[in-house]
Image (spheres, rainbow, N blue to C red):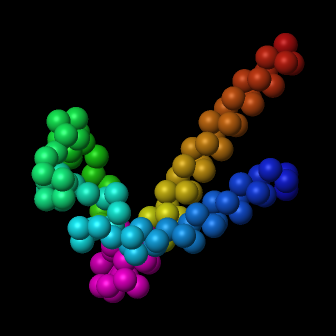
Amino acid sequence: MDKLLKRLLIVFVVLIILVPIGLLATYGGEAYGEWGPDELQKMVGYVPAGFQSINGLWNAPLSGYGTPATPPGFAGDSLGYYLSAVVGAVVIGGAVFLIGKAFTKDATKKMNK
């Protein structure tokens, strides 16, 4: 395995392991940075127009990071965070791999002509 790829995979694994830190860093009862318009209104007194206009544009497939199988509380939330992190890493890693394959395939074709 390439040395750079090995280092990137180690960084990926470390980031996935650190995922539940967001649960510990709460502000206003929610995980840090995961506020909706209602939470922002309570915390700062207003909701920026741009934020309000894109609210609801995207609904996460693992909304709330939980699954019916995970128990309530920190342990269950952590499992949901890990599941979300792994699924996200696999999807993004797979997409980057496929895009890279497509570009190298095109470059190889051009070089062989």
Q: Is residue 11 left or right of residue 18?
A: right
Relative to 56, is 62 above or below?
below
Foreground pick, 85 / 61: 85
Q: Is residue 51 left or right of residue 65?
A: left
Residue 78 in magenta stretch: yes
Q: Is residue 73 left or right of residue 24?
A: left
Quarter of the rendering containing residue 38: bottom left
Residue at screen point 64% across, 66% down: 13
Residue 9 place in picture, x, y as percent: 70, 59
Which residues lie in the magenta part?
65-81
Residue at screen point 28% across, 46% down: 58
Foreground pick, 30 / 10: 30
Residue 98 place in picture, x, y as percent: 63, 41
Residue 95 place in picture, x, y as percent: 57, 44
Relative to 102, is 7 above or below?
below
Inspect this view and state whether residue 100 appears: yes
Quarter of the rendering containing residue 89: bottom right
Residue at screen point 85% across, 13% down: 113
Foreground pick, 83 / 27: 27
Residue 10 in magenta stretch: no
- Outermost residue on the front side: it is 44
Tell me how many marks there are: 0
Q: Split into 4 quadrants, where in the image is the N terminus?
A: bottom right
Inspect this view and state whether residue 53 appears: no
